[in-house]
Amino acid sequence: MTGFALYRLPHEKQVTLVAQNEGEPLKLPSINELNGRSGFVLAPFFVSSEEPLLLIKPDVVKSFSDVTEAKDVICNSQMPYLQMVNAILMGRKWHTYEERSAYAEDFARFHARLKDESFQKIVLSRCSVTPRDGEDHPLELFCKACQLYPRMFISLVCTEQSGCWLTATPEILLEGVGNQWRTIALAGTMKLKDEDLNGEGEHATWSTKNIQEQRYVATYLMNCLEQFATNIREEGPRTVRAANLVHLRSDFTFGLSEGAGVGDVLLQLHPTPAVCGLPKQTTYQFILENEHTPRQYYSGFMGPLNMSSATHLYVSLRCMQITDSQYRLYAGGGLLKDSVEEQEWQETEAKLETMRRVLAD
């Protein structure tokens, strides 16, 4: 066995295992190469030889009624899932740096390009490192994330090329069955506190900055879809909850135009302004050249592609890479011209809480 993925869709209990028995997961040179294929996709923020676009072949596909059944079967399976994970955790070495000062340096560099109006919006991310003593197996963390976050897409993906990634994300990139498709524009962030934790964020009052940030994403998606889609319908924005945060969300439903493939749409959509910026290509390149830590598979996308005729691809947010000695947690936030560095730092701290809760005793 050379790679596997465990996932659970939002608001469902069923857990699905996708595993490849022989050979490496397929490395694809471009996102549009996903046209006509099936399997579990793991896409990086930027496709490269170091972080390839991977497709796990569905040699084994098993569904379990819940996480307890999935854990029991996998732990007692004849296939060496646990041994494979332990082998993958060993390997890469990472440089360290002072997180707070690195973020401040990056913010100043990014914000300068907003103030001189080179960019309308740009997303700045960071990586927070937590030591790992090896006691919590990734499978245990996957089960805990499923229990903590019923509204989110939860996945554990392990391959030799990518390492092991645990994700709990609220953001659909593209999903559909047949010719019924949808995507969402998810942006803007507020942390729920006190009595608001008992609800769904219905009392949230959004700032102009958050509204503008979400509108950028929605407009971008509409422009992309008009090239490939028919019968486009937009609903929203509305407030939605993800863990202890709320976001602004607009939903787009559509059909695909004749001759349009899923890979073609994904190539146009990714990366959206929710994880990159505007204008797209210049902010994309600026991020690659200027963030302290390469994003790798953070802010890429993942999920089952054309399996049982259905596709469920999610943006890889609220995620961490698990190594033999570290948990590497990732988070980011959209910057606009009037963004304030301390406020943006606190937003990333709030987003990191999603995975920190999974690691908590």
Image: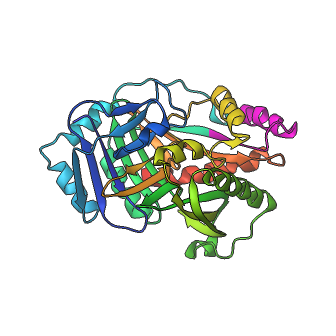
Q: Nearer the viewer, residue 361 or 128?
A: 128
Establish if 107 lies above or below 12: above
Q: How is colour applied across the structure in the image?
A: rainbow
Question: Is residue 44 found left or right of 189 in the rendered image?
Answer: left
Q: Nearer the viewer, residue 117 or 310?
A: 310
Residue 345 appears in the picture as rendered: no
User: In which quadrant will I find the C terminus?
Assistant: bottom left
Q: Residue 108 is drawn in which quadrant?
A: top right
User: What's the residue at 47%, 48% (across, down)?
Assistant: 262
Residue 145 in the image: x percent, y percent? 41, 57
Magenta-colored stretch includes residue 307: no
Question: Is residue 137 found left or right of 220 in the rendered image?
Answer: left
Question: Is residue 37 found left or right of 288 in the rendered image?
Answer: left
Q: Which residues are magenta?
A: 104-125
Q: Nearer the viewer, residue 89 or 277?
A: 277
Residue 191 in the image: x percent, y percent? 64, 62
